[in-house]
Image: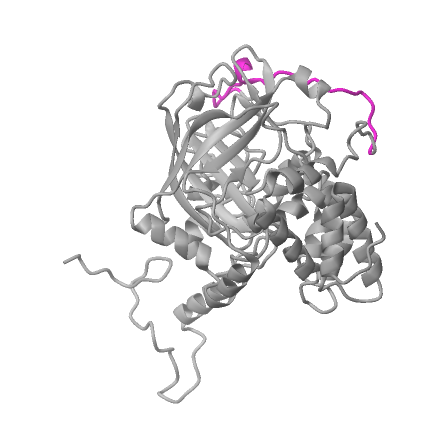
């Protein structure tokens, strides 16, 4: 039998009166001097940290990543220096638009964020279960997310807001087509793929840079729900995806994903039909084949959800030596926005929280701020350079210069084919989907667009039909028929 533990206050004082407040006699008023009553109530009032603005509803688990193929000629990252290398990982899955208490079977993209605890620091690959996104410029991100949240007047979710935005932003079409296919309602988290989505870069020991996209392919097989199945679970088990993950790992049925990459040289990027840094587009696999890298396995549920999942902070700016960023405009915005969100939600020292702390030693001159719990640098200086702490820089850690295509700063500087929003979504509908998937996609779109209301209803519907027509005439006609709208095509 384990030794019994004494109840204490947060400061360590043994305490007995945990259930009854101190009062003046059995019926008298409660006394101000009952400090533990204050402590319990004050802490209770502060148990909820700010909810994530996006990706609020989530699940997660720990595991390991194992390198299975040699890509050391492309990157000098120590993790990939030889086959067989391993590191601990944390993965957080999530829905995007819903609140923390929402159902996790909603039609919504799924977040797929991986934290690699490497010997060279934390590498965060923060993506979704789709290879593309709705917009390609971070300036539009707050506006887009507002349409996925609640109407400021009614406080209700609004199909009108969503389709109004999408019909005014045809660049969203590719992601919209994926969202309203059955891929928009995956069967839990184990049976879906994950993608870094953005273009990143790999840097080798010769300081040569090559562009890369990361893909996690589920080894459980892709499984999705129909719209009706997802809606049924929404009412009967709103935590289905969380439960499925917990149950699988608890039974030893550890989910796995194969990490694969696509590579593109700078020369290929210059000659590519589309902007290779546009996150609304994919790189065709026929032109840029997938290369095997390793296997990700989740085998450990956290002991405490709040400590390890709610406080987990992922940021695309967390890269390691040998892995770099790209001129992707959406990525450039995210490398600012994500750490800023964490500093607001968790405090300036969020990377001292155990789940976010790197496994290697950190040496910097950041001091003070709320919740500095690692000794705050002790008596060492808080400035650099200095003559005392022996912290130095190493030129070998320097990234090579990123060669840019233009020296002109302009908010509207686009490639010739940047406005081709239709070819890839059209190919997805015609060539990738089968008849059943096409029918389900049309039906799901019709169900959602049927919720458009108000004086602008007809205008929004016709504008979106025009966008569908640009991708595929049969798609536009089928949606128009489902909405009982006369097609003009």
Q: Is residue 134 left or right of residue 348?
A: right
Query: In x, y percent, where is residue 37?
Result: 41, 71
At 68% across and 21% down in the image, what residue appears?
269
Residue placed most toward the observer, 447 or 371: 447
**In the rendered structure, which segment of residues is drawn in magenta?**
387-411
Indicate the colouring scheme.
Answer: one colour
Q: Is residue 305 above or below residue 86?
A: below
Residue placed most toward the observer, 438 or 208: 438
At 78% across and 55% down in the image, what residue appears?
164
Residue 169 in sight from this viewpoint: no
At 72% across and 69% down in the image, what residue appears?
154
Query: In x, y percent, where is residue 142?
Result: 71, 49
Verify whether residue 365 appears in magenta: no
How many marks overall? Answer: 0
Q: Is residue 445 left or right of residue 59?
A: right
Q: Is residue 25 above or below residue 267?
A: below
Where residue 151 sits, quadrant-wise, is: bottom right
Residue placed most toward the observer, 170 or 31: 170
Quarter of the figure with the N terminus: bottom left
Q: Is residue 368 above or below residue 479?
A: above
Where residue 481 sits, quadrant-wise, is: bottom right
Residue 16 in sight from this viewpoint: yes
Query: In x, y percent, where is residue 266?
Result: 66, 17
Residue placed most toward the observer, 78 or 346: 78
For this orientation, the residue located farthest to the left is 1
For this orientation, the residue located farthest to the bottom is 27
Query: In x, y percent, where is residue 16?
Result: 29, 70
The majority secondary structure of the magenta stretch comes to loop
At 73% across and 64% down in the image, what residue appears?
152
Where residue 399 sits, quadrant-wise, is: top right
């Amino acid at each position: 039998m384990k030794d019994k533990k004494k109840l204490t206050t947060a400061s360590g004082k043994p305490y007995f009166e945990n259930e009854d407040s101190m009062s003046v006699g059995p019926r008298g008023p409660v006394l101000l001097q009952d400090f533990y009553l204050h402590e319990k109530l004050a802490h209770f009032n502060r148990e909820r940290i700010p909810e994530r603005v996006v990706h609020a509803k989530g699940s997660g688990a720990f595991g390991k990543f194992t390198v299975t193929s040699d890509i050391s000629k492309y990157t000098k990252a120590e993790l990939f220096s030889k086959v067989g290398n391993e590191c601990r990982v944390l993965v957080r899955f999530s829905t995007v638009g819903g609140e923390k208490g929402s159902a996790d079977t909603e039609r919504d993209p799924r977040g797929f964020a991986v934290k690699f605890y490497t010997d060279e620091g934390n590498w965060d690959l923060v993506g979704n279960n789709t290879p593309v996104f709705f917009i390609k410029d971070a300036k539009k991100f707050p506006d887009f997310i507002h349409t996925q949240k609640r109407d400021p007047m009614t406080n209700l979710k609004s199909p009108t807001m969503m389709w109004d935005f999408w019909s005014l932003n045809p660049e969203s079409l590719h992601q919209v087509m994926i969202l309203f296919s059955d891929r928009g309602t995956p069967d839990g988290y184990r049976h879906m793929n994950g993608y870094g989505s953005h273009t990143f870069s790999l840097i080798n020991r010769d300081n040569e840079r090559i562009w890369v996209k990361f893909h996690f392919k589920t080894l459980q097989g892709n499984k999705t729900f129909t719209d009706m199945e997802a809606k049924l679970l929404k009412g009967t088990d709103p935590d289905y995806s969380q439960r499925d993950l917990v149950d699988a790992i608890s039974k030893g049925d550890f989910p796995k994903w194969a990490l694969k990459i696509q590579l593109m040289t700078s020369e290929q990027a210059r000659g590519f039909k589309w902007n290779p840094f546009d996150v609304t587009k994919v790189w065709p696999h026929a032109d840029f084949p997938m290369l095997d890298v390793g296997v990700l396995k989740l085998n450990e549920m956290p002991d405490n959800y709040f400590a390890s999942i709610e406080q987990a902070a992922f940021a695309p700016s967390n890269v390691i030596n040998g892995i770099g960023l790209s001129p992707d405009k959406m990525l450039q915005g995210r490398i600012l926005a994500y750490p800023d969100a964490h500093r607001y939600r968790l405090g300036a020292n969020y990377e001292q929280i155990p789940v976010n702390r790197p496994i290697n030693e950190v040496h910097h001159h950041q001091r003070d701020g709320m919740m500095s719990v690692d000794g705050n640098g002790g008596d060492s200086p808080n400035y650099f350079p200095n003559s005392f702490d022996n912290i130095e820089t190493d030129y070998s850690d320097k990234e090579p210069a990123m060669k840019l295509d233009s020296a002109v700063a302009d908010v509207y500087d686009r490639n010739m084919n940047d406005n081709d929003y239709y070819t890839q979504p059209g190919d997805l509908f015609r060539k990738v989907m089968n008849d059943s998937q096409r029918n389900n996609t049309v039906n799901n779109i019709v169900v959602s667009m049927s919720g458009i209301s108000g004086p602008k209803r007809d205008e929004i519907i016709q504008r979106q039909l025009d966008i569908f027509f640009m991708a595929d005439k049969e798609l536009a006609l089928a949606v128009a028929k489902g909405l009982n709208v006369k097609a003009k095509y």
